[in-house]
Amino acid sequence: MDTSKREIAATAARLVVEEGMEYGPAKRRALRELGLPARTALPHNDDIEAEVRDYIALFCADTQPQELKALRLLALEWMERMAAFRPHLGGAVWHGTATRLSDIYIQLFCDDCKSAEIALIDHHVDYEPRMVAGFHGEQVEALSVHAMSRLLGEEIGVHLLVYDLDDLRGALKPDGQGRTPRGDLAALRRLIEKDTI
């Protein structure tokens, strides 16, 4: 990785950890903060994630593990609540790089794409529907809620991304680093148990 990409990755990582930004916006803001031209080549997300891990190890090692556990427990609550829709946890909470500023991203794989929304309505859950980029870059519906984390004492954004059941097959293919990009309820429970030991 060349020097400018390394600087962008390090600056973006700081923005991700300190401000809870997503990787894409953090990279673009890092460009501006560093005064680099808009056409400067950007680092890959894997490079950002490596810098995020380094930043957490250096500056947040005393607080991040407890924050991550609190987020994983909140994700578990929501996955149990939405168990009928084959929930899978992804993003920073799954990969272990989340802090209290991170949102939770849960993918739902539904027989009927409106059924998850109907379930939220039936349980009187306030949510905001919107369209976001899915795991293959396609537009998918996200049902976003604010959920209270008792352990953190604050509200956390929980985003339920609604996919068709057929999308589940491709969802579990390993990423570029050979990791499982998301996990189901059983996998999340194993992560939580491992963190507790």
Image (cartoon, rainbow, N blue to C red):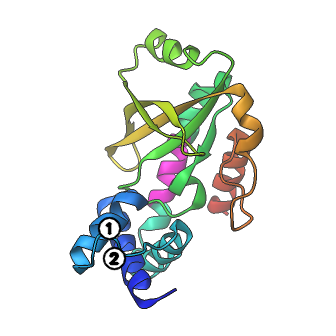
Residue 184 is left or right of residue 121, and the answer is right
As drawn, which residue projects farthest toward the top? 122
> Which one is nearer the viewer's eye here, 105 or 124?
105
Residue range corresponding to the magenta coloring: 67-75
Residue lying at 31% horizontally and 67% vertically, measured from the top left: 18
When asked about the image quadrant of residue 63, the answer is bottom left
* Residue 115 image point, x, y percent: 57, 14
When asked about the image quadrant of residue 16, the answer is bottom left
Residue lying at 48% horizontally and 9% vertically, measured from the top left: 122
Query: Tag on residue 15?
Result: 1
Residue 20 is left or right of residue 179, and the answer is left
Query: Tag on residue 75?
Result: none
* Residue 14 image point, x, y percent: 34, 73
Above or below, 85 against 156 in this view is above
Magenta region's main secondary structure?
helix
Q: Amino acid at mark 1?
A: Leu
* Residue 171 image point, x, y percent: 70, 43
> Tags 1 and 2 in contact by the CB under 8 Å rule?
yes
Query: Tag on residue 11?
Result: 2
